[in-house]
Image: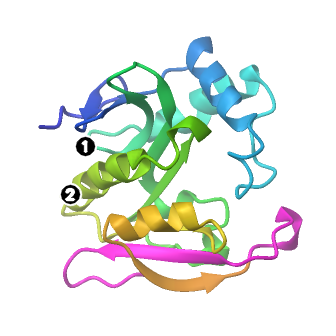
Amino acid sequence: MTTPATATGVLETPRLRLRGFTDTEADARLLFELDSDPEVMRYIGPFGLPSVEAARERLRTVWLPYYAPHAGRGFWAVVEKATGEFAGWIFARPAPAHRYADVIGWTRPTDLELGYRLRRVAWGRGLATEAAAELVRLSLADPAVTCVVATALVTNRGSTRVMKKVGMARVRECLLPPETGFTDPLVIYARCRDGCSPT
């Protein structure tokens, strides 16, 4: 059973508790420490958070405004029930909010982007898939949502495996702008409501 999602609400899966973030220093420190791991950021590029204060500002001005009355919408801290440990984060937000939405071709606000970033200790245990499956389910339960979409570098096989496991299908590839430093293409995945097609 899922608890209604609000900024302070909680979603639950068998092993995980997904809670809303706050703009506290404690949450900001969790985000900063996650982004400070070069292996976590390997496929993400130069977009990490440079300080705890920058993380807190991101929470305050970017992440918290995404919370909505729709279940599952927004950014969620992924916490392991068994240990209470922070495993990372996951989100569902309107696809046009992506930094490179114009390059990817995400222009439809009724499409929701799925994204996730987990600590290394959480890798390889199916936690990202478990959390993502819940957000995909909740997103597509909203009749206003046309598709759930996601993207990753084609070399980021761990991330693309999660997309496949939650029922998303490969749509196409595209190249990122040169300033990202990545020459590998992005691969785009989508899972759509019956009768809808990905953009």
Q: Secondary structure at mark 2?
A: loop
Q: Residue furthest left?
A: 1
Query: Per the image, is 193 magenta?
Result: yes
Q: Is residue 72 left or right of residue 35?
A: left
The amino acid pointed to by label 1 is Ala
Q: Secondary structure at mark 1?
A: loop
Q: Nearer the viewer, residue 178 or 108?
A: 178
- Residue 118 screen position, x and y as percent: 55, 42
Marks 2 and 1: CB-CB under 8 Å? yes
- Pinpoint residue 62: horizontal percent, then vertical percent: 58, 38
> Quick check: 80 left or right of 42?
left
Please state the extent of the stretch shown in magenta in the rendering. 176-199
For residue 190, above or below residue 64: below
* Camera-side residue of 46 and 196: 46
Residue 89 in percent (x, y) is at: 50, 38
Label 1, on which residue? 71
Residue 71: % across, % down:
25, 43
Residue, x 39% and y 50% (percent of image)? 126
- Residue 64 can be seen, yes or no: yes
Horizontal side of 5 relative to 165 (left or right) equals: left
- The residue sitting at the top extreme is 25
User: What kind of residue is marked 2?
Assistant: Asp
**Residue visible at 18% across and 32% down in the picture:** 3
Question: For the residues marked 2 and 1, what is the alpha-carbon distance in whole angstroms?
Answer: 8 Å
Q: Quadrant of residue 100?
A: bottom right
